Amino acid sequence: QVQLVESGGVLVQAGGSLRLSCAASGNIFSINAMGWYRQAPGKQRELVATITSDGRTNYADSVKGRFTISRDNAKNTVYLLMSGLKPEDTAVYYCNADHTTRWSIRGSFWGQGTQVTVSS
């Protein structure tokens, strides 16, 4: 099993910046892609950004140019630097990790979420 713990969610004013962190721990063999997703009240969970183990990134159109995803493979940690925040970025942000065991069994793991609130 892999555990993911997010941190960094706070209340911030529109136009501000924030960095989220997500650290993976547990029985880790190989973490492939990691990513951030978010879920606003009354809406479905949506992809924000993903990053592969070799650094290839993918972003939702709504955050391109404002958010930057990065990771530290040595620390099994993924970050999301958010700038130019808008009230519509308000959501619970979830970290996700795609993991492969030494026996080539793949699994997808989620963190508990961290609340980001952007005030206008």
Image (spheres, rainbow, N blue to C red):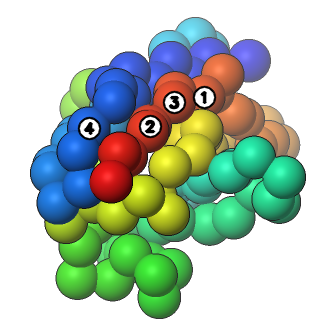
Q: Mark 2 points at which residue?
A: 116
Give me the C-alpha separation between circle 3 and circle 4.
11 Å
Badge 1 vs badge 3, beta-carbon distance below 8 Å = yes
Report x, y in % for residue 12: 26, 38
- Give, as a three-letter code, the residue at label 4: Val
User: Is 9 positioned to the left or the right of 45 in the image?
Assistant: left
Report x, y in % for residue 103: 78, 37
Question: In the picture, residue 78 is in which quadrant?
Answer: top left
- Foreground mark, 3 or 4, reads 4
Binning the other alpha carbons within 10 Å of mark 2 as few (below 14), some (14 to 19) or many (20 upward) gives many
The residue lying at 50 percent from left, 63 percent from top is 88
Give me the C-alpha separation between circle 2 and circle 4.
8 Å
* Any part of residue 17 in sight: yes
Give me the C-alpha separation between circle 3 and circle 2.
4 Å
Looking at this view, is 93 or 78 the one in front? 93
Which of the two discs, 2 and 4, labels the residue nearer the N terminus? 4
- Give, as a three-letter code, the residue at label 3: Gln
Label drawn at residue 113: 1
Q: Is mark 2 on a helix, strand or loop?
A: strand
The residue lying at 72 percent from left, 35 percent from top is 109
Looking at this view, is 38 or 100 the one in front? 38
Badge 3 vs badge 2, beta-carbon distance below 8 Å = yes
Which of the two discs, 3 and 4, labels the residue nearer the N terminus? 4
Q: Mark 3 points at which residue?
A: 115
Q: Is mark 1 on a helix, strand or loop?
A: loop
Q: Name the residue under label 4.
A: 12
Report x, y in % for residue 77: 34, 33
Relative to 60, residue 111 above or below: above
- Foreground mark, 2 or 4, reads 4
* Any part of residue 72 in sight: no
